[in-house]
Amino acid sequence: MSFTHNWDGVPIENADYETTTYINERGESLTLSKLVYLISDITFTDAQGTSFSAGDYNLVDAREGVNLSFTPDVVIEEGTYNVSFTFGFDDEDNAGDYPDLNTADGGVWIVPMMLGGGYHYMKLEGKYLDTQSVPEEEVGFAYHAIRANDNSTSPITLQDTSFTVDLGDVVIGEGTNIEVQMNVAEWFKNPHTWNLYELFSMLMPNFNAQILMSENGANGVFSRGN
């Protein structure tokens, strides 16, 4: 598998981070500085409905070019399979202990227990142009996706906001590569038009924001390349 990233079809290259300006669905100008995300449970399902799960995960750092290629840890016969994966960790996997993720991203890929524990699904960061301030100024945003949590309740309310990505049927043979494309613009687009003026930071403890992120992510962020 290989992972590529674009903004409405325009490839995002390493040189674009902190330099290229993008316009989101709401018309806000922004630049990107970081894109790190986790996928898990890559699954191949044959025509008879038998599933073969890799049972592993891949942490992609798009800007640094880390883990842009990944070979799932599963052996299957050649043939046609429906291919899917999970964005983030479902609750069962999120309860695990992963030494490499414990130290990833400077040791802050782990979600604090006060927010439900587990791990991040994604960190998408950058700056947007605040045109309402005088003078205009750039404001940092941190679009961090985790399991939705509400620690105002006892016990804490948790909701799994991972989602399954269906890449469709793929003919698998020796040397087959599946390109997984992420359209970053979709995180801000559909079904919820994202307002960076209102939702730009402190999103991890924001239960409703995490639901919105999950719904946007499940609605076309990922697709399979040709």
Image (cartoon, grey):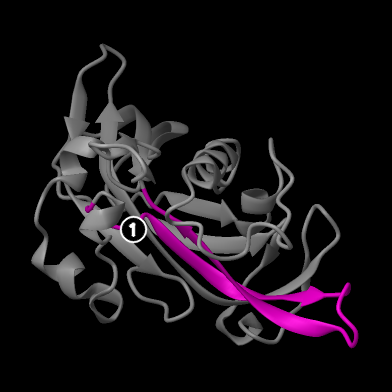
Picture quadrant where residue 97 is located: bottom left
Mark 1 Cα-neighbour bin, 10 Å: few <14, some 14–19, many ≥20: many
Q: Quadrant of residue 95?
A: top left
| Magenta-span inclusion, residue 142 | yes
Q: Nearer the viewer, residue 192 or 45?
A: 192
Q: Is residue 87 above or below residue 10?
A: above
In percent of width and height, residue 50 lies at 20, 18
Magenta region, residue range: 117-146
Kindly identify the residue that appears in the image at 28 percent across and 73 percent down: 108
Left or right for 69, reference 113: right
Could you say where residue 118 lies in the image, as x and y percent from the top left? Answer: 22, 53
Residue named by callout 1: 120
**Can the viewer see residue 164 in this picture?**
yes
- Measured along the vertical axis of the image, is residue 118 above or below residue 168? below
**Which amino acid type is marked by label 1?**
His
Give how far across and how far down residue 24 sits, in percent.
77, 59
Q: Quick check: 9 above or below 74?
A: below
